[in-house]
Amino acid sequence: MSFYITTPIYYTNDVPHIGHAYTTIACDIISRFKKLHNNEVFFLTGTDEHGQKVEKAANNANLDPKQFVDKVSVNFEKLVSDLGCEINDFIRTTEKRHKIAAQSLWNELIKNDQIYLSHYEGWYSIRDEAYYAESELKKNNNKYFTKDGSPVEWVKEESYFFKLSKWQDKLIELYENNPNMILPNSRYNEVLSFIKSGLRDLSISRTTFKWGVQVPNNENHVMYVWIDALCNYLTAINYPKLNDNKFTNFWPATHIVGKDILRFHAVYWPAFLMAAKLDTPKKIFAHGWWTNEGEKISKSLGNIIDPYEIINEYGLDQMRYFLFREVPFGNDGDFSKNAIANRVNADLSNNYGNLIQRILSFIVKNCESKIEATQNFTNEDYELIDKFIAKFEEYQNNFENYQIDKSIKSIMELLSHTNTYVDTQAPWSLRKNDIKRMNVVLFLISNIIIKSTIMLYPIIPSSSKKALSFFNIDINNVNFENFTKINNKDLIISNPQPLFPRIEL
Ligand code: MSP
């Protein structure tokens, strides 16, 4: 099976912050989970480099737009690897391959009679790169603003239009037939009711600035940044070469996006695709927004969370873990230093790290670092094994619906259970009077630790690899096939070290 997952491409008008990191890590987690299921994964991210917003940012920095985006894009690309994310491609919309793809998509829409030339007049927000109806705005000091506070200005220009209104019924039909295509469900309902409230044709070109992909055969127009940007998902798999392996193998994609840009992905994008006679996305998941200690994150408030600061203070896996355990994926969440410390201490240091540490150091000290394989399990052992099987099933089902927090919770429940098992079986007492039983108990605990560690791998990949190395296991040699079976293999322990030191509050 192949699986194509995408982040939104990030605007190159700013430095990356925790919100950008969040979407990228989400895709990394999902793609690692899919790889454990032996899927062939294509994971795409990149930067959205055109449009008036970027042009203005370049002007403010006294740079030519291309020089400016070259500089800013690098920060986003570097962040991906610094977040421990394994991508397959990083796309920039200023690349030649993208210009070709975007213009081909445009030509295809022209060919299918989906575009016409007319005039546009309306309230435009540069920050959102979108037009608004007056009913969507609020007035302050004789100026109009969007509900999120972006200023809008009255714009009149010649514009190409996409016949979006024609696609209203098809979109309704698409979503009524595929109720799981947009997740979470509340977002599905929101999108469907937006479509049902009526769609107007969409202005898809601009004449007031030049920083964009030129409209084919009309040099006065550049493409509206959203049609240009959305097309990146096709560019990366070699569109317009429809017979290309990459294209046939990976399209359609699963898009992970923030709730603020769901409309572009769930209304405009599927309509463009249908109009170009291409398949609509497989799934669109909209996640929530992070606030900082209760406040909306914004540059003007000066409370942007720098992912590097969190990584330096708490560690990369600690940050990844916190972001996806603390808040249900899809909901808004509040970032606070207290919350990250508490979460890491309770789950990673106490529940997981201590278990590994105490069992492995016991084995090193008392068993010459070796445990012989056995299947001599008692009823109590089978109870723990059954628990593991049940929790693994929960973990998978939740992951399939992108309920990552619940998946993690299942692992933590399994680990709590294992800790209780350790206490009741008390290998330290067995050492004195029943070495054989002690061996069985340690073998089972070690195996459950290995299983939990593999289940944690998508979320905390580098710690998980390290923990597996204590058992001489290479992550590249494991997957979820026959996962519920307890291996009949001797275990040799090497070099166990503490993984998650407690964070002092
Ligand atoms: N360039 C467009 C996307 C085009 S996709 C074809 C864009 N870029 S963005 O840089 O403004 O935002 C990228 C992503 O970051 C969005 O999914 C957005 O929701 C996410 N976030 C930005 N701030 C965020 C938080 N405070 N919290 C969580 N995610 C946030 O939109």
Image (cartoon, rainbow, N blue to C red):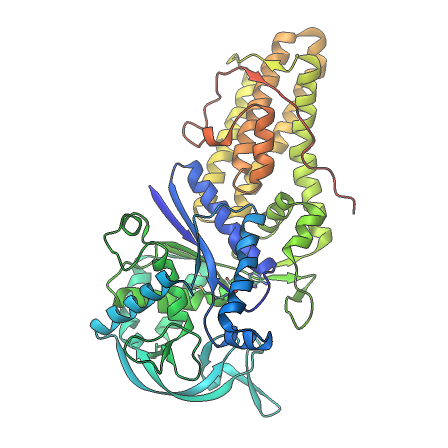
Q: Going by the image, does 308 lie left or right of 5?
A: right
Residue 190 visible in the picture: no
Residue at x 66%, y 40% (from the top left corner): 347
User: Residue at the bottom extreme?
Assistant: 142
Across and down, in percent, residue 142 comes to 58, 92
Instruction: Point out residue 491 in the picture as x, y percentages from the top left corner.
Output: 56, 17
Report whether 28 appears left or right of 205: right
Q: Which of 256 and 473 is in front in this view?
A: 473
Question: For the point 61% across and 25% down, which residue is it?
Answer: 470
In front: 413, or 109?
109
Location of the N terminus (image quadrant): top left
Residue 367: % across, % down: 66, 12
Q: Can residue 35 be seen in this view?
A: yes
Q: Is residue 413 left or right of residue 501?
A: left
Quadrant in which residue 462 is drawn: top right
Identity of the residue drawn at 31% across and 55% down: 238
Depth order, front residue of 385/54: 54
Q: In this view, does 212 lie above or below 80?
A: below
Which percent across, then down, holds residue 319?
63, 48
Residue extending furthest toward the right: 505
| Residue in the foreground of this view, choosing between 40 and 262 | 40
Residue sitting at 59 percent across and 53 percent down?
A: 327
Determine whether 472 is above or below 187 in the image.
above
Tell how many labels: 0
